[in-house]
Amino acid sequence: MESRHDYLRAVHRAAAPGASLFVLAFAPQPWKIEGPGPDGFTAEQLSETVEAVWTVEAVRPANLYATDHTAGAGSADTAGRDSEGRIAMPGFILIAHKNGDLGR
């Protein structure tokens, strides 16, 4: 968790005054995938993580899409698909802006 805050602080320092931050993150997945993969965030977890450094304006549901050319172990066979066959995964888009200096 601390590495997330370190990253957000570094981006904040590098950003211009009034800059916007957009984060597209996975939601917790309803299916089990063997092997490595994202844990996902609830909307509340995402907002709480980012608002420690940035001013959060909105968190909205969003979809993340990927192509899957292999159907081996760990593939997202149980995930939803869009009309073009891409894997459709639930997530969130967070919109925030830089408001002042961190003073840290």
Image: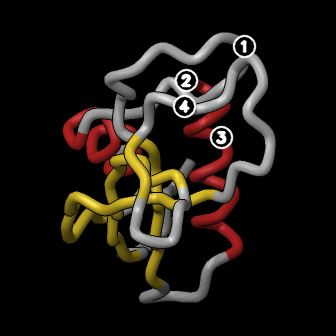
Q: Earlier in the sequence, mark 3 or mark 2?
A: 2
Q: Residue at x 48, y 14 (%)?
A: 32
Q: CA distance from mark 3 to mark 1?
A: 27 Å
> SS for tag 3?
helix
Crowding around mark 4 (Cα neighbors within 10 Å: few <14, some 14 to 19, many 20+) is: some
Q: Identity of the amino acid at label 4?
A: Asp
- Whether pointer 4 and pointer 1 mark residues with C-beta atoms closer than 8 Å, the reply is no
Crowding around mark 2 (Cα neighbors within 10 Å: few <14, some 14 to 19, many 20+) is: few
Q: Residue at x 56, y 47 (%)?
A: 104
Q: Identity of the amino acid at label 2?
A: Met
Q: Foreground mark, 1 or 2?
A: 1
Q: Foreground mark, 3 or 2?
A: 2
Q: Is 77 or 94 nearer to us in this picture?
A: 77
Crowding around mark 1 (Cα neighbors within 10 Å: few <14, some 14 to 19, many 20+) is: few
Q: Is residue 73 left or right of residue 5?
A: right
| Displayed quadrant of residue 4 | top right
**Which residue in the structure is indicated by mark 2?**
1
Q: CA distance from mark 1 to mark 2?
A: 21 Å
Q: Identity of the amino acid at label 1?
A: Gly
> SS for tag 4?
loop
Question: Can you give x and y, in whole percent of width and height, for residue 21 in the image?
Answer: 47, 73
| Number of marks | 4
Q: CA distance from mark 3 to mark 2?
A: 9 Å
- Whether pointer 4 and pointer 2 mark residues with C-beta atoms closer than 8 Å, the reply is no
> SS for tag 1?
loop
**Which residue in the structure is indicated by mark 1?**
35
Q: Earlier in the sequence, mark 4 or mark 1?
A: 1
Residue 6's mark?
Answer: 3
